[in-house]
Image: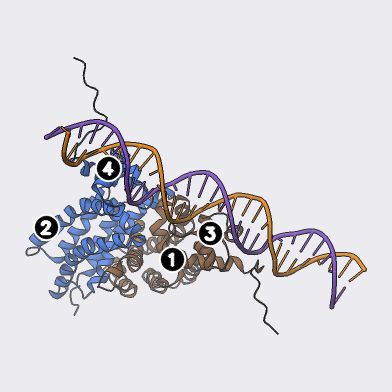
Chain colours: A brown, B blue, C orange, D purple
DNA sequence: GATTAGTGACTGACCGGTTAGTTATAACGC
DNA sequence: GCGTTATAACTAACCGGTCAGTCACTAATC
């Protein structure tokens, strides 16, 4: 009859990592990497600190796992889509596709994680190195292929791919940081949507070779 | 006859603030705001922690003073130049002037401070708020006037100024962060110069109204 | 000798990571 | 089914170290 008081501890080896990861994402997003206490992640996940360290060897490794969890599916999807569409689509449309992905990331774990890494990577070499090789390199490879291909085919004016990539990612990255860090103190709202639309029209439009150019 | 041993302590009320500010800039730049110890700033300035707190009430106020010191002269110069040139120069050239200022900031205190604020502003509301009102708002005002003017005069295609501003600052901001945080782990060098050149040619070029457009 | 710039030991709070001990649960024997 | 034992998931208290900020004191200067 009387309902059992729920046991103070439960053994759920399979469910824990996911729950801890989800809790970590939330707390890291709210407070940043350096400022979150592993204790907070633990209590948010309904466990204690010791349990977190049972599944993840260090705070940094926990964060890397969060990065993997949030970004790898997105990167994989982009790589896949570009690989499939590359044959039948002009370079400008491939770039437009990628730029248009950013707004869809804005409110998601992926957006939050990108913001986190950009903001705090500088103080955590291990994380910066991980992110550079596992995320940036992969995205840059895709972008560089599209841009260089477009230039070679005469669709684009001659541009340096590395610089153009910065121009394509920079506005979205800054907007992400803006939303999180500065927007609360400002009155001019800026939405990712319109930034990426402008970028698409003006920058990608500006890359196209005009008629009669050499 | 015998030269006095130099006194172990010197009283130099006038010189201290500048020296502390210079030391703070160096250490903040190297380690970030959160990670620098006030003790390190002090010893770099040849002084002890107590002396730092004699001139600056908190670590955050010290950082705000560093921001003021590094950025206000630059902002003032830009405002001045634009105000003078506005009458006689087309909007595109005014934007080009501003974009071309970025590379000159790259290795300077101004560049370092911008990077610092972008990276760590999120975790320090007071600093983010200060930076938003004292730096961002001022720069945005200048930019918005140029862009809106260019659109109204028919020089530019119709673009939303806030979005265009993100597109103009984003690439430089990301490059700044890149140089500091990720470049060490990568093999593709990216220089501010070429990013800003590309931005000038492609983005500002892309804003110009083509012949025959409505 | 009065004033005050400058010192540095100290405090209180915080936090990543460790570990000895606890207990839910699975496995086994009957 | 039911008791017994072995396993390992989980906890709680702790430790070592760090650091912003304070304050009683020291000495340079007027």
Chain letter for mark 4? B
- Secondary structure at badge 2 equals helix
Q: Give the farthest residue toward the bottom.
A: A1
Check disc 2: other Cα within 10 Å, few if <14, some if 14-19, many if 20+: some
Measured Cα–Cα span from mark 1 to mark 3: 14 Å
Q: Nearer the observer, disc 1 or disc 4?
A: 4
Question: Does the rendering let one see residue A190?
Answer: yes
- Secondary structure at badge 4 equals helix
B11 left or right of B126? left
- Secondary structure at badge 1 equals helix
Q: Is residue B39 above or below residue B201?
A: above
Measured Cα–Cα span from mark 4 to mark 2: 39 Å
Which residue does the numbered mark 4 point to in the structure image? Answer: B51
* Residue A88 picture quarter: bottom left
Which residue does the numbered mark 2 point to in the structure image? Answer: B81
Chain letter for mark 2? B
Residue B6: image location, x then y, percent: 24, 26
Q: Give the mark, 4 or 2, whose residue is nearer the N terminus.
A: 4
Residue B31: image location, x then y, percent: 37, 48
Q: Nearer the viewer, residue A164 or A121?
A: A121
Measured Cα–Cα span from mark 3 to mark 2: 49 Å
User: Residue at coordinates 46% horizontally, 72% vertically from top-left?
Assistant: A85
- Secondary structure at badge 3 equals helix
Which residue does the numbered mark 1 point to in the structure image? Answer: A29
Q: Nearer the viewer, residue A141 or D8?
A: D8
D25 left or right of B72? right
């Amino acid at each position: 009859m009387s309902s059992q008081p729920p046991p103070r501890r439960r053994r759920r080896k399979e469910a824990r990592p996911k729950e801890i990861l989800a809790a970590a994402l939330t707390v890291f997003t709210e407070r940043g990497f350096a400022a979150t206490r592993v204790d907070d992640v633990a209590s948010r996940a309904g466990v204690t600190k010791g349990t977190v360290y049972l599944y993840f060897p260090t705070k940094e490794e926990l964060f890397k796992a969060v990065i993997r969890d949030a970004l790898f599916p997105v990167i994989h999807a982009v790589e896949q889509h570009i690989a499939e569409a590359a044959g039948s689509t002009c370079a400008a449309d491939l770039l437009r596709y990628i730029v248009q992905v950013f707004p869809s990331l804005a409110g998601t774990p992926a957006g939050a994680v990108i913001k986190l890494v950009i903001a705090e990577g500088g103080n955590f070499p291990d994380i910066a190195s991980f992110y550079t090789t596992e995320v940036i390199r992969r995205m840059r490879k895709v972008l560089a292929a599209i841009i260089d291909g477009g230039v070679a085919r005469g669709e684009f004016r001659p541009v340096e791919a590395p610089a153009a990539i910065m121009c394509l990612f920079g506005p979205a990255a800054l907007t992400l940081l803006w939303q999180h860090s500065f927007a609360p103190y400002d009155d001019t709202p800026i939405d990712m949507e319109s930034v990426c639309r402008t970028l698409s029209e003006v920058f990608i439009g500006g890359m196209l070779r005009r008629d009669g150019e050499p």
